[in-house]
Amino acid sequence: MATLDELEQSVIKITKRPDQSARIRKAIKTATLKAHRKGFFARDLDRDLVVLSQAANSGVFDISTQFPLLRKILAVNPVTDGKLQNPLTAVDADNLIGHFGTPKADIYYQSGEEINFHTSYAYQSFVVVAYNNPNVSDSAYSSWIANNYEDCIVFEASRQVLASIGKEAEANSLEKNRNDSYAELIRDNLEQEDH
């Protein structure tokens, strides 16, 4: 498992700048987020059950506890008798009214850390599926990309550090290695559509 300290040492080896520790750590965190945002990876998915205090066909529930590192909601599925129902349709908050002036049903929209829903039937439980960001905090740094595709993060962080201290030519020389690492990450972890 690649730790923040190990990644920092790898960046120092490339940049030869041990005096830039704070800048390097910040660049590693930025590079980690950048790598995870290269696609919607299955390894970033998480799911959790949200249980309301009572069944309702419209309402709001907070997801900040279940998904403190939330990137994007993928699906909200009502649950009846322990079985998943069809997922609700995601809509924008300004698209809640149907063609005849009636509220749309079986929909949800996200407002900050809350999910607002309106359904045809009253439900008490929902399974929420979401993409999470990696944890880039100093105390709990964790990234499957750092563990399996360390070069994506090390080359990008090194490039950022070198560019920030005026070493543009050296920074630019790392782009091919970084891009090759990104290509490997995407090839190995994103399903390609058959055409």
Image: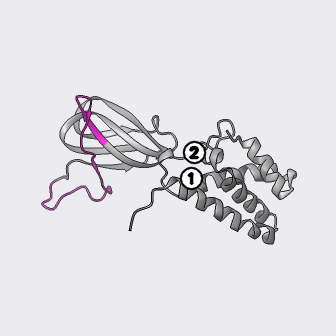
The residues colored magenta run 77-102
Categorize mark 1 by other alpha carbons within 10 Å: few (<14), some (14-19), many (20+). Answer: many
Residue 91 image point, x, y percent: 30, 55
Q: Is residue 105 left or right of residue 3?
A: left
- Residue 142 against residue 178 in the figure, above or below: above
Does 38 sit left or right of 50 as displayed?
Answer: right
What residue is disc 2 on? 134
> Which SS class for mark 2?
loop
Q: Is residue 62 above or below residue 40?
A: above
Q: Is residue 86 magenta?
A: yes
Q: Which residue is mark 1?
A: 36
Q: Residue at x 51, y 39 (%)?
A: 68
Picture quarter containing residue 17? bottom right
At 48% from the left and 54% from the top, the residue drawn is 40
Q: Residue at x 18, y 52 (%)?
A: 103
Which of marks 2 and 1 precedes in the sequence?
A: 1
Residue 167, given in percent of the width and then of the height, sits at 82, 68
In this view, 30 is above or below 52: below
Examine the rendered structure and indicate whether residue 123 appears above or below residue 115. above
The answer to whether marks 1 and 2 mark residues whose Cβ atoms lie closer than 8 Å is yes
In-front residue for pair 183/6: 183
Mark-to-mark CA distance, 1 and 2: 7 Å
| Amino acid type of the residue tagged 2 in the rendering | Pro
